[in-house]
């Protein structure tokens, strides 16, 4: 048991890997609004990490952090995809994103944070999986990107797709797994920590690839 707890905790430090790249590549990152938004997403993740660590150290459940992070995550990633997919009605879609975020906030409030708000998370997971696939469809249809492996948004989108596609199973069964043995829960969250760590590496590569006024 201690082995799984220790390794899951060590893997969670992966959240700081993209932060290092954000600090190193801060000038080209602030050139595009899309990279600004994704940087904000990483910073929000780090804030959630610190809050979860603080609450868990006092034996307090972290559902309030997880549920609140899902709300902030939904807003930032929605605006990110509205930006990179270049929708025509950006203002309308942005307003819809803010309205849905407000509704999600209310659902988190009324849940009393005694369990994972799985309905909000399932919806956001499915939405971001679809938007990630739309991004791949867009770049393949337009064929404007000459060097895909040098394109930062390719890495951001790949990491998002990997995370949400793999974690939707955990989200759906999260409350059910709470009734299983501690060892089963440790297996589950260790798997989740490994996926997170891989995604952070992919995000870090995306930040590293950012270039000011570059053509990809």
Image: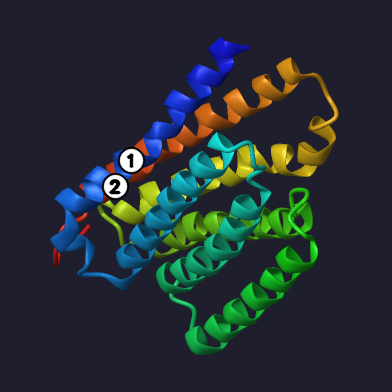
Residue 147 seen: no
Residue 86 in percent (x, y) is at: 43, 75
Of the 4 image quadrants, the one containing the C terminus is bottom left
Number of marks in the rendered image: 2
Q: Which mark is residue 152?
A: none
Mark 2 packing: few (<14 Cα in 10 Å), some, or many (20+)?
A: many
Residue 4 in percent (x, y) is at: 57, 16
- 67 on left or right of 29: right
- 73 on left or right of 108: left
Residue 37 seen: yes
Going 44% across and 57% down the picture, which residue do you hit? Answer: 44
Which residue corresponds to mark 1? 16
Is 34 located above or below residue 87 in the figure?
Answer: above
Of the 4 image quadrants, the one containing the N terminus is top right
Residue 31 in percent (x, y) is at: 20, 70
- 135 on left or right of 113: left
Going 71% across and 37% down the picture, which residue do you hit? Answer: 170
Secondary structure state at the residue bearing disc 2: helix
Which residue corresponds to mark 2? 19
Going 65% across and 77% down the picture, which residue do you hit? Answer: 102
Residue 12 position by quadrant: top left
Query: In the image as oriented, which residue stretches furthest toward the front?
Result: 58
- 127 on left or right of 131: right
Q: Nearer the viewer, residue 177 or 55?
A: 55
Residue 212 position by quadrant: bottom left
Q: CA distance from mark 1 to mark 2?
A: 5 Å
Q: Are marks 1 and 2 in contact (CB under 8 Å)?
A: yes
Q: Nearer the viewer, residue 87 or 45?
A: 45
């Amino acid at each position: 048991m201690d082995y799984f707890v220790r390794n899951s905790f060590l893997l969670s430090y992966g959240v700081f890997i993209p932060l290092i790249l954000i600090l190193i590549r801060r000038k080209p990152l602030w050139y595009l609004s899309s990279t600004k938004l994704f940087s904000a997403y990483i910073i929000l993740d780090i804030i959630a990490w610190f809050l979860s660590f603080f609450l868990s150290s006092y034996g307090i459940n972290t559902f309030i952090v997880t549920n609140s992070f899902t709300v902030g995550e939904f807003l930032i990633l929605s605006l990110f995809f509205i930006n990179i997919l270049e929708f025509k009605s950006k203002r309308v879609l942005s307003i819809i994103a803010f309205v849905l975020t407000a509704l999600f906030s209310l659902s988190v409030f009324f849940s009393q944070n005694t369990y994972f708000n799985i309905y909000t998370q399932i919806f956001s997971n499915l939405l971001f999986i679809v938007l990630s696939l739309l991004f791949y469809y867009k770049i393949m249809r337009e064929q404007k990107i000459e060097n895909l492996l040098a394109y930062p948004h390719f890495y951001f989108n790949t990491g998002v797709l990997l995370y949400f596609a793999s974690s939707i199973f955990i989200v759906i069964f999260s409350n059910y797994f709470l009734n299983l043995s501690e060892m089963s829960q440790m297996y589950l969250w260790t798997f989740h920590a490994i996926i997170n760590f891989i995604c952070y590496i992919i995000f870090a590569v995306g930040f590293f690839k950012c270039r000011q006024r570059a053509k990809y």
